[in-house]
Image (cartoon, rainbow, N blue to C red):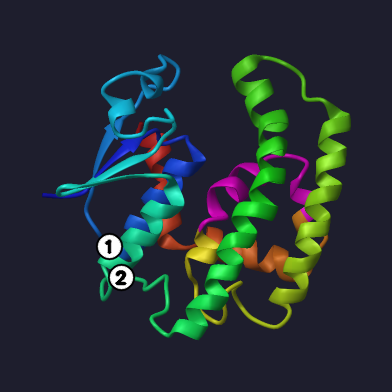
Amino acid sequence: MAPKVHGNVFSTATMRAFATLHEKGVEFEVVHIDMKAGEHKKEPFVSFNPFGKVPAFEDGDLKLFESRAITTYVAYEYHGKGTELVYHDTKKMAIVSVWMEVESHHFDPVVSILLFEQRVKPMIMGAEPDLAVVEENQKKLGLVLDVYEARLSKSKYLGGDEFTLADLHHLPTIQYLMGTSTKKVFEARPHVCAWAKNIMARPAWTKTVAMQKQA
């Protein structure tokens, strides 16, 4: 049986899972969760994720939640298919793991605030973004991306010379931010800008974004 992803095609976390499966060339089934109707906070979804957040994942008798745990499982379970996304050399994988942690603990908290102000408020809540909050967090993002700029001046990708989960995990939030004024924070750093354009052009990511148009 094909793996199942319970989620929403517009959710950044769900998009991470989709992109990983596309990179691996693994066929999967999407179980749509209507978040506007609050399905992610009700049964049967909360039996998959008691925290009520998408996505959840099934592969046979295995059930997972948390998008980065799902992507890591898929990358290792389907070793030998599609893009590797992880290393089996422990030292190389240690470097990739560092940048996966950076994305989770330094990049994502800042961009989540920017996405809320610049995408969620105007498009879903019908409210204006707080420009002071946007400016403050664009400055914070700039400091994070200064570290990325230094790293990407020495290697093509964050984890080394090959595309890995360390890069993939950034894709959903970067995709949305490129439609906001925060785009300038990326464009001000040439190595970061080139990296972002490169990873967003990947066929697997194009497939992931196309799923939104089909929804």
Q: Are marks 1 and 2 in contact (CB under 8 Å)?
A: yes
Whether 159 is drawn above or below 170: the answer is below
Question: Whole-percent x and y of residue 134?
Answer: 81, 35
Q: Amino acid at mark 2?
A: Gly
> Foreground residue, 21 or 42?
42
Question: Can you identify the residue that label 1 sits on?
Answer: 25
Compared to residue 59, the image places residue 79 above or below, namely: below
Most foreground residue, 55 or 182: 55
Q: Which residue is mark 2?
A: 82
Amino acid under label 1? Gly
The residue lying toward the viewer, choosing from 209 and 112, is 112
Q: Which structural element holds mark 2?
A: loop
The residue depicted at 24 percent of the width and 58 percent of the height is: 26
Identity of the residue drawn at 26% across and 76% down: 80
Tell me which numbered mark, 1 or 2, is placed earlier along the sequence. 1
At x 39%, y 56%, the residue is 71
Task: Give the crowd class for mark 2: few <14, some 14-19, many >=20 residues within 10 Å.
Answer: some
Residue 44 to residue 203: above or below: above
